[in-house]
Image (spheres, rainbow, N blue to C red):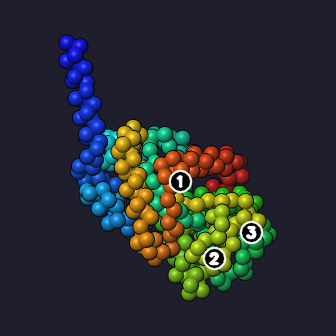
């Protein structure tokens, strides 16, 4: 009997290994917490490069709602078998859980597969305003508290939070005006009702080139490849650094062989020169992190957001 049980155990283990060895054997679903036409373009650009490396179709499903909470909970509840993945910005797992204590998920519920892009936010302003640099904006805002109208993609969105962080670090006060999306905020800025917007540069780049808007500073740790003449916030005397990273995650409990297979395919696809060409077209920086590197980035980012969110000045700026 003991021999029989041992033989069955060996067969079960062998079957498990074989199942993992043939991964993937069916289409992979990628849940995206954004509406079509936004950040999901980064994943859709990677799709044709990643598909042949995995040998199975990738089905991208847009699941917007509640600031990404709906999509995050769907992935968290999915089987950790590699057939349901989550494409999202890291802020959804590092910033949002620190701001919302009612959430039912956190970093520990997901396994990082690989980071794909990294893009700093830009502080954009109307070109007809009296301040031509970030230092001049800070000086103006200090002399005129609340007179600078700051547009955002909506209350609690990353554009709002980054704007509040800049106010905290710069010791200034803006008047927050929320919109339904960053494109709406930028259009309002072009129309003259908004003075500044903090957001990813892609939507503002055409207006920088036309001269209607002016980039004042970038939130990255170094100058941005697509706007090399624009200083960082640090160079402008504002102590705040942030890069919007986007990548793939899986539910907690993913078997190591499956993670290894997925991570290798993602790395190859992200490092494909064609992906760089596609991201250049939308002014998005390609930035790969392995699962181990990605986890370290997430942990550090979460600690940084937690410290900032605990600052009473930040809480005041978010009102």
The CA span between labels 1 and 2 is 25 Å
List the residue tagged with mark 1. 91
Element marked by disc 1: helix
Say few, some or many: other residues with alpha carbon within 10 Å of mark 3 (under 14 / 14 to 19 / 20 or more).
some
The CA span between labels 3 and 1 is 24 Å
Does residue 115 lie above or below 257 as drawn? below
Element marked by disc 3: loop
**Looking at the image, which is closer to me, 290 or 177?**
290
Give how far across and how far down residue 263 sits, in percent.
41, 52
Q: What residue do we see at 23% from left, 49% from top?
A: 25
List the residue tagged with mark 2. 228
Looking at the rendered structure, the number of numbered marks drawn on it comes to 3
Give how far across and how far down residue 294 sits, in percent.
52, 50
On residue 57, the disc is: none
On residue 236, the disc is: 3
Q: Are the two marked residues, 3 and 1, in contact with CB atoms closer than 8 angstroms?
A: no
Q: Can residue 54 be seen in this view?
A: yes
Q: Indicate the quadrant where residue 227 lies.
A: bottom right
**Looking at the image, which is closer to me, 121 or 248?**
248
Apparent side of residue 264 relative to residue 205 in the rendered image (left or right): left
- Quick one: quadrant of the N terminus? top left
Q: Indicate the quadrant where residue 164 lies.
A: bottom right
């Amino acid at each position: 009997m003991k021999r029989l049980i041992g033989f069955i155990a060996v067969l079960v283990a062998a079957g498990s290994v074989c199942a993992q060895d043939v991964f993937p054997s069916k289409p992979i679903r990628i849940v995206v917490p954004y509406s079509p036409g936004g950040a999901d373009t980064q994943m859709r650009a990677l799709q044709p490069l990643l598909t042949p490396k995995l040998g199975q179709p990738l089905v991208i499903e847009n699941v917007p709602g509640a600031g990404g909470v709906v999509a995050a909970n769907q992935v968290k509840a999915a089987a950790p078998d590699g057939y349901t993945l989550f494409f999202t910005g890291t802020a959804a797992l590092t910033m949002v859980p620190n701001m919302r204590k009612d959430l039912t998920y956190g970093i520990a519920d997901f396994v990082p597969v690989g980071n794909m892009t990294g893009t700093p936010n830009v502080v954009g302003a109307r070109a007809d305003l009296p301040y031509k640099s970030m230092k001049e904006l800070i000086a103006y805002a200090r002399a005129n508290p609340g007179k600078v109208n700051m547009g955002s993609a909506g209350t609690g969105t990353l554009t709002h939070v980054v704007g509040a962080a800049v106010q905290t670090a710069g010791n200034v006060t803006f008047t927050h005006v929320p919109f339904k999306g960053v494109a709406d905020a930028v259009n309002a800025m072009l129309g003259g009702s908004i003075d500044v917007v903090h957001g990813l540069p892609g939507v503002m780049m055409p207006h920088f080139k036309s001269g209607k808007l002016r980039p004042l500073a970038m939130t990255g740790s170094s100058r941005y490849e697509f706007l090399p003449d624009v200083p960082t916030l640090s160079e402008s005397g504002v102590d705040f650094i942030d890069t919007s990273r986007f990548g793939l995650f899986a539910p907690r409990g993913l078997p190591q062989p499956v993670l290894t297979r997925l991570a290798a395919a993602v790395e190859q696809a992200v490092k494909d020169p064609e992906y760089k060409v596609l991201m250049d077209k939308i002014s998005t920086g390609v930035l790969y992190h392995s699962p181990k590197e990605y986890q370290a980035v997430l942990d550090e980012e979460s600690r940084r957001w937690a410290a900032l969110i605990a600052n009473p000045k930040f809480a005041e700026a978010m009102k």
